[in-house]
Amino acid sequence: MAQTPSTRPTACLVLSDGSIFYGTGFGATGVTTAELCFNTAMTGYQEIMTDPSYAGQIVTFTFPHIGNVGVNPDDDETGDPVAEGMVVKWDPTEPSNWRAAERLTDWMARRGRIAIGGVDTRRLTRAIRQAGAPHVALAHDPEGNFDIEALVAKARSFPGLVGLDLAKDVTCAQSYRWDEMRWAWPAGYTRLSEPKHKVVAVDFGAKRNILRCLASVGCDVIVLPASATAEEVLSHNPDGVFLSNGPGDPAATGKYAVPMIQGVLAADLPVFGICLGHQMLALAVGGKTIKMNHGHHGANHPVKDVTTGKVEITSMNHGFAVDAQSLPAGVSETHVSLFDGSNCGIAMDGRPVFSVQHHPEASPGPQDSFYLFERFAADMAARKA
């Protein structure tokens, strides 16, 4: 299938099956290859583009108004955009928001990220849902010169995310301390002045707002690279250990992260994991992970806490999932997706060790699950008491 443009296109998206979507390019010029996913969030495109979990992916935004509030320095989830590119329905308009410091189009160009507008994103999303997340090539040429045959070949040569360790590409280069708390009106971001708990956060691609949420419940956070060993983690004498979100195949990252997690578990510390951290905790206790057809990416995913019966609307971003049937005795499933029944949380029976697939820090999304950070803080307080 091919989408025919009404004017000469300056960008095209080519799927590995030969499908072509033409449109108007913005941002950087050139060609990039990646896995294509779609995100249903109505807000937070800047946070999504800078979320390290999107390494190796191009994001199709199902909401058409992308770029309408511009971008600003406060909303970056990491130093630079990590998603390879974006696909949108309507070309970005002039920003209309008091916080806007720059236009999305300029920001994308300055940060070296390619985007295409004018695409029938509903049609593209249906294709992703039906056939699974495809491998694609995205090209932007102001002159509109495209070698479609070469682009199809590039899309087909993309290796995919299965077996790919991307955490090593997005993790911090060295350890650092974090004490900035969540944004609040009118002061904005403030610093933690009276820490109650010392937490080591292992950075597999951590979002800044996760670290802010930890600080907001009284955690003095020390962030370590993904390659940190159990000995390095425990050398800081933490009250608890946090396993961050991140990109790629958990089984690939788990080759070096699982032994670290098992060493932390042997020390009987409270442990909290999110997204990739959740998946690798499951691997560390004997479970398995699987690649999903098209993953979960959005800010409106209903998740049921099976321990309380409560339903939360959550933010999600993952293409792999824990196989609940593989969980061993002593590990319980705590949360499930009400979209497809996939696993969204686990806990070790009788121990302060738990993790969730969704993102309780939101950014973007609802804050129904923020209580999980408070639970982690309570676990650390109980252990010290």
Image (cartoon, rainbow, N blue to C red):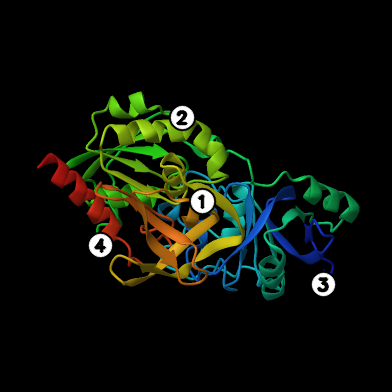
Rendered image: mark on residue 133: none
- Amino acid type for the residue under numbered disc 1: Thr
- Amino acid type for the residue under numbered disc 4: Pro
Of residues 370 and 380, the one nearer the viewer is 380
Rendered image: mark on residue 186: 4
Picture coordinates of residue 237, whole percent (x, y): 23, 29
Viewed as shown, does residue 73 lie left or right of 311?
Answer: right
**Do the numbered discs 1 and 4 sit on residues whose CB atoms are within 8 Å?**
no
Is the residue marked by circle 3 packed among few (<14), some (14-19), or many (20+) residues within 10 Å? Answer: some
Picture coordinates of residue 148, whole percent (x, y): 88, 55
Residue linked to disc 2: 227
Q: Report the mark closest to the observer, 4 or 2.
A: 2
Alpha-carbon span between mark 4 and mark 2 = 38 Å
Q: Report the mark closest to the observer, 3 or 4.
A: 3
Rendered image: mark on residue 5: 3
The residue located at (60%, 74%) in the rendering is 64
Marked residue nearer the N-terminal end (4 or 2): 4
Alpha-carbon span between mark 3 and mark 1 = 30 Å
What SS does tag 1 mark? loop
Q: Residue furthest left?
A: 385
Alpha-carbon span between mark 1 and mark 4 = 25 Å
The residue located at (38%, 34%) in the rendering is 262
Q: Is residue 270 above or below residue 92?
A: above
**Do the numbered discs 4 and 2 sit on residues whose CB atoms are within 8 Å?**
no
- Amino acid type for the residue under numbered disc 2: Ser
Residue linked to disc 1: 50
Of residues 29 and 347, the one nearer the viewer is 347
Alpha-carbon span between mark 1 and mark 2 = 22 Å
Q: Report the mark closest to the observer, 1 or 2.
A: 2
Viewed as shown, does residue 70 lie left or right of 369?
Answer: right
Marked residue nearer the N-terminal end (3 or 4): 3
